[in-house]
Amino acid sequence: MFRHTPLAVLGLSLAASATGTQLGNTRLVLERVNTTFFIQRQCQPTSTASLASNQVTGLDELPAALLHLVLADLPVQAVGSSELAECQGLAAQLVESRLRALCWPEARVTNQGDTATGAATALPRLSVQLGAPSRIGNIFVSFGGNPKVSPVRITQAAKSALPQDRVCTVSTLEEMRSRVSKLGTFQQVKVVTGAPDEREKNKVPLIIDVAE
């Protein structure tokens, strides 16, 4: 079913119950990805829909709950805010952006065609190549104002959740957020990946974004 969805509502649907729930950090990360994605492309989704698992190949290793979030509320139609805006085929591009923000910096997503030939609003079939997951590099803390909790303590709490091989996974980011959240009364804690290291493409920094 297609839904006519303003951008603000799209963000809220992914962020709903983001705190204190399963995959809470992932919901916040995807909300951030969605907002940045449409601003950069100067596009506004006019209708959205979610893909079923049988409309995507290459994501069999994802747990069902995570797969649902990655494929939720994808733009079926969008309009540009400028004449130069490219607002076609955004579903594949958005899935790719989401996966890259969730520790797969080499993810590639291609559109394999529509589920209903000739239908202007048909949902696409997507083919995904995840590539190797990244490894975690440096950890930084971002906060506004004068922090009540020391950035050193925040960094230490985040590092305590690092696996020995430092492989970046959604579960690791969720555990980091959980441990940092226990240090104080925060309005929000979000763990996001940064741009891959120029010298080591398979390594990404993490930013612990804290609002007190």
Image: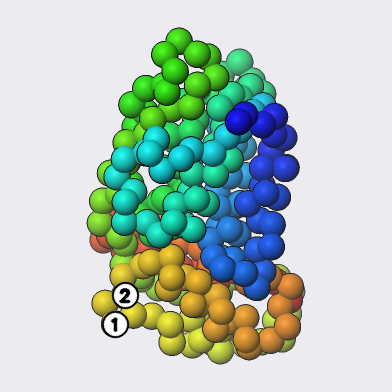
Q: Residue at x 56, y 27 (%)?
A: 76
Examine the rendering and report whether any part of residue 109 can be seen: no
Q: Is residue 65 above or below residue 123?
A: below
CA distance separating discs 1 and 2: 5 Å
Secondary structure at badge 1 equals: loop
Q: Residue at x 31, y 70 (%)?
A: 167
> What is the three-letter code of the residue carrying label 1?
Gln
The quarter of the rendered structure image containing the C terminus is: bottom right
In the image, farthest residue toward the top: 118
Give coordinates of residue 110: x percent, y percent.
34, 32
Examine the rendering and report whether any part of residue 100 can be seen: yes
**For this view, does 63 lie left or right of residue 8?**
left
> In terms of image quadrants, where is residue 151?
bottom right
Residue topped by disc 2: 166
Give coordinates of residue 108: x percent, y percent.
32, 41
**For this view, does 133 lie left or right of residue 85?**
left
The quarter of the rendered structure image containing the N terminus is: top right
In the foreground, 203 or 117: 117
**For this view, does 117 lie left or right of residue 151?**
left
Give coordinates of residue 109: x percent, y percent.
35, 38
Q: Residue at x 61, y 15 (%)?
A: 83
Give coordinates of residue 23: x percent, y percent.
54, 65
Instruction: Confirm or deny contact between disc 1 and disc 2 (CB under 8 A).
Output: yes
Color encoding of the figure: rainbow
> In terms of image quadrants, where is residue 126?
top left
Q: Residue at x 42, y 73 (%)?
A: 172
> What is the three-letter code of the residue carrying label 2?
Arg
In the foreground, 134 or 57: 57
Q: Which mark is residue 164?
A: 1
